[in-house]
Image (cartoon, rainbow, N blue to C red):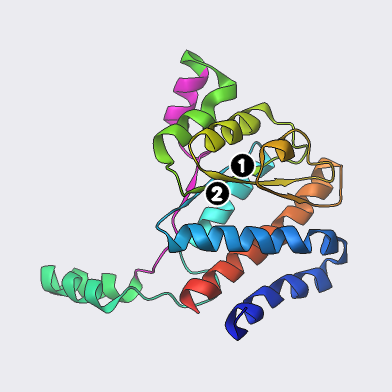
Amino acid sequence: MNENIEKIISHIDETIERYPSLSSCRQSMSDAFFMLTSAYENGGKLLVAGNGGSAADSEHIAGELMKKFRLSRPILPELAQKLKEIDPIRGKKLAENLERSLTVIPLVAHETLTTAYFNDVDSEGVFAQQLCGYGKSGDVFLGISTSGNSENIINTAVCARAMGIKVIALTGMTGGQLAGHADISIKVPETETYRVQELHLPVYHCLCMMLEERFFG
C-alpha cells in the first residue's frame, strides 16, 4: 500500500476516534472503500437505495460525491476550453463553476417512476426495476437498511448479484437477511433504528471523504 493510500485509509481511524463504537466496522469500511475505488477506476458507478431516513441518506451520499465535498474539483482543462469556445460568456462561467463528479444514482429519487411501479406492478421490486435499467456489470449497489430486512432492498441486492454488480450492505448490528446477499456488510453496532442511523452518517461521510481524496486529492 503506497503512502497516499495509507493516508486516505487513516480517515477511518480518525472517524473511529470520534465514534469509538465503529471500531468493529474498520475492516468492512476499508473493504468498501477499495471496492468503490475499483469500480470508479474501471468506469463503474454507485447505485444507492434505502427507505425512510435511509432514503434521505441515499440522496445525501449522492450530494457528497456528485459535487465538491471537502476538496476542490475543477473540471479538466480540455472541457473548460471547449465550453469557452462554444459560448465565451456562459462557457467561462461554467468552466469556473462546474465540478468533477463521482457518478451516483440514488434509486429513491425518481417519484414518477417509483409511484408508477408501486401502482402498476409491485412495491417490493421498485428499486430492483431501476437497478435493471441503470446498472451494469462493474457497478456497485449500496443497500441501506437499519434492520437488514427491508424486502425491496434485499430484492435489489439479488438483482444486482444476477447482473454482476457488487453489493455493499450498510445495516445495524445483525445485518439481517441483506448481509447474506452482500459482498461486504458494514454492520454498525446498534439495533434501534435511530441509533443505527446516527452511526450510518459518519460511516458514509468517511467513505465519501476517502473517495474524494483518492480521485481529486
**Residue at x-position 19% and y-position 70%:** 83
Q: Quadrant of residue 33?
A: bottom right
Q: Is residue 116 left or right of residue 25?
A: left
Q: Which residue is mark 2?
A: 59
Which region shows up in magenta? 98-118
The verdict on residue 13 being magenta is no
Residue 32 percent across, percent down from the top left: 64, 58
- In the displayed structure, does residue 51 sit left or right of residue 128? right
What residue sits right under mark 1 in the picture?
55
On-image quarter of the N terminus: bottom right
Residue 78: x, y in percent? Answer: 23, 75
Three-letter code for the amino acid on which mark 1 is drawn: Ala
Marks 2 & 1, CB-CB < 8 Å contact: yes
The three-letter code of the residue at mark 2 reads: Glu
Residue at position x 77%, y 73% in the image: 13
Q: Judge whether 66 appears above or below 50 on screen.
A: below
Q: Name the secondary structure under disc 1.
A: helix
